[in-house]
Image (cartoon, rainbow, N blue to C red):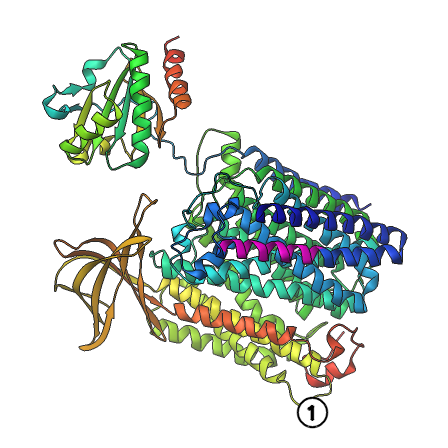
Amino acid sequence: MTPLLGRTLVLLSLLFASAGAVFAFAAALRSSRPALILARRLAYAYAAAMTAANLLMISALLAHDFSVSYVAQVGSRSLPVWVTIVSLWSSLEGSILFWGLILGLYIAVSTAIISRSFEDYLPGALGVWLSCATFFSFLLAGPAQPFATITPVPLDGPGPNPLLQNHILMAIHPPFLYLGYVGMTIPFGLASAALMRGQLTQDFIRPLRRWLLLPWTFLTVAITLGGWWAYEVLGWGGYWAWDPVENASFLPWLTATAALHSAIVVERKGMLKGWTLVLIKASFLLTILGTFMTRSGVFNSVHSFTQSSIGPTILVFLAIASLWSIFLLAMRIDSLESERHPLYGASREGMFLINNLLFVLLTLTVLIGTLFPLLVEAFSEKQMSVGRPYFDQMAVPVGVALLFLLGIGPALPWGRATKDQLRRVFLLPLAAGAVAGGIGFAAGVRGVPTLATLFAGGFAAVVTFRELSRSLPTRSSAARGPSRRRFGGYLVHAGAVVVIIAIAVSSTMKTSIDAQLTLGQTVKIGDYTLTFAGAREVAEPHRQSIIATVNVSRNGSQLGSLTPRMNFYENQREPIGTPDVRTSLFEDLYLSVMNVDPQNQTLGLHAMINPMVAWIWGAVGLMAIGSVVILIPRRKLIIAPVPTDPAMAQIAPGVEVEAG
Amino acid sequence: MNRRVLLIGLTASLPLLVVLAMSFGRDPHRVNSPLVGKDAPLFRLRGVAGAPPISLADLRGKPVVVNFWATWCVPCHEEHKILVETAAAMGSSVQFIGVVYDDEEAKILEFLRLNGNSYPTVVDVAGKTAIAYGVYGVPESFFVDTKGKIIAKHEGPLTRELLYEYISRFKAHLG
């Protein structure tokens, strides 16, 4: 019964999405209002069908209805309820179903909002959104069916991948990732609509940027949660490994970040319109590339799903979407009427341009590094892998340059800066940079990249803080909207400054030791003394664990004990360790088990001191808060076109005044 | 139509799509063994339950399938039945050898009683042979030609089709 109902809902969603796409494109071509109204209703119907299908799957999972193929694949009677709900997206078919839900909700909400103020853009956008929806419904109807019928009905199932069961972050990271990935469909549709109409007006760039900022924020948080999960669970003491699937989520983030900046130039100067649309389209296409990389079985990664047959289907979709985007861009880019202004190097817009070039450079670097092994293997028998050294060597200089730019850009005026202005705005930041570098040097930092990061970080911090205080929202402020937007933007910058510094420090200043200990033996790392206080075996329904207890003291005072462990899962060949971390403000003490023997009470311990790691999580939180400050709708101002505002110039005197 | 945009777009995306399309069927877990194409490391190991020892060097002139396995390895059970059947079918044209890794005598005998026994099984004491062959996990199989050279390596359980495919390569090497 449930499988039949589920398949019906999936087929209905396919019907609604495909018919809606046809009507929407018809409405775009002939500007037919009845067709648009119909398309809009079909969009809501698609969202409703997807929501119903997801609710049905969740209820089947909770009811352990093993006649549904997906439940038989990932369900298990012995699981806690949260794992049962999480298993909705733990495997391939369910993850596509969940994708459909998020896409449906995004389409419904953005249709409702966009129709209020920018109805002219709606037909084209709706056509693109529903075309994407058609594709994902097609996957659910054919190659990745979650609602197939199983006979005879099994009594119990195996449960999801054990790695996904051992940390609560696995319940939070994937939804954020989907909200980021799927959300890129919305700006993609809006950018396509702008191209189809052959115009990108200054008042439309604002909602376009907001619809880009929303998935960008989710993606930022999702990438960080993924790193955090790796840090807390995988036991090697790091949070980023340049793994193909990590890179897959990083690529659209990079282009979207570039687009968020170039959109400001469009808004202020009417320049870079075509370029901004290219970046937005690339961000979406890179999410589809990422989906391909995770689900085609071509890449090896801790994150990827198992081998599947949907790879070719996704690749066809990627090819169609790419070629269509390229042709649309080529056909319409000249009609966008970007304004041309003389571009001065020492100006805000000049810095935006350099920012964009750096982000694109980083995107290409990561893309090439990720795909190079495929390229080599496609044309020769050789196997190869591109490892950390390549990515680190390429990414570190670009990262430092971006951090420096984070300080220079906001300090420069639009148009052309005079020498006097330059001296005035940069004197203090330069001094702060020198102080930050000096403090680092005194604290024992000797690596040039880290010192450069500290210098650029000090520089950027002062500028960001100055701009932040200038844009503080005040109750009396006449133009609260724009001011709040600037304030939020600089909060994001402040977070970014801290993240980059924390990454530099944590990855270059860590210390580690390996020790083989018997019961009661101690080992020292930094100021900490670690004592092995015993190992015990614990049996849980889904795994066997050996837990080591290590007492920690610092300069003679007891700090409690840490319990890193080794877990043995039934269907896993190798045991999986779980580290234990003691976090303090400036450093983490990180312990993981290399080998442990409860009979003879011996422990092979890998201990690390990782400085400033907690700052990364906190600072990304700050970035998210900054984005939310920008995104919260207050008054109608957000979707209504904002009048060109002389008030802007008043709230930020000096640097904000256009010199040109 | 802006030809420059079209040209840049196509030159950036088409090669990418082609490379991705060519990558289907790639197994990202596969690791090429540096041993393939080299002489197989020689070993002389004692048989199970007092059976005479076997030396790889003595088998020169015959194609050999060296299969590393263990009783605690779940996929080895299914694979073993296929190996036993195939070895019996091949007769003396191909020599099969099972090398047991990290295991106990009693368990090995019980395993052989359950899953069949049509070719010699030897015991890899202290895992030295497994180390010489770079065995990463069991089961793992090496195909050694008449001149003592490794022509192929397979990680994970062999299916009947795969096994015949590898054995057919012995003939290709000869002819």
Residue beneath the point at 17% across and 77% down: A556
Residue beneath the point at 52% across and 69% down: A496
Q: What x and y, as percent, mark residue A541?
A: 31, 54
Q: What x and y, as percent, mark residue A360?
A: 61, 55
Residue stretch rendered in magenta on the structure: A46-61
Graded by Cα atoms within 10 Å as few (under 14), some (14 to 19) or many (20 or more), the crowding at tag 1 reads: few
Q: Is residue A48 magenta?
A: yes
Relative placement, left or right, of A161 versus A365 is left
From this viewpoint, which residue is outermost toward the bottom?
A476
Pick the residue in front: B40 or A363.
B40
Residue beneath the point at 54% across and 63% down: A220
Q: What x and y, as percent, mark residue A492?
A: 57, 72
Relative placement, left or right, of B90 versus A291 is left
Figure quadrant of residue B95 = top left
From this viewpoint, which residue is outermost toward the top?
B175
Res. B149 visible in picture: no
Q: Amino acid at mark 1?
A: Ser
Q: Is residue B84 magenta?
A: no
Pick the residue in front: A237 or A463.
A237
Q: What x and y, as percent, mark residue B69?
A: 26, 31
Looking at the rendered image, the quarter that the C terminus of chain A falls into is bottom right
Q: Which residue is mark 1?
A: A476
Res. B49 visible in picture: yes
State the SS at label 1.
loop
Residue beneath the point at 38% across and 35% down: B31
Relative placement, left or right, of B14 versus A429 is right
Figure quadrant of residue A517 = bottom left
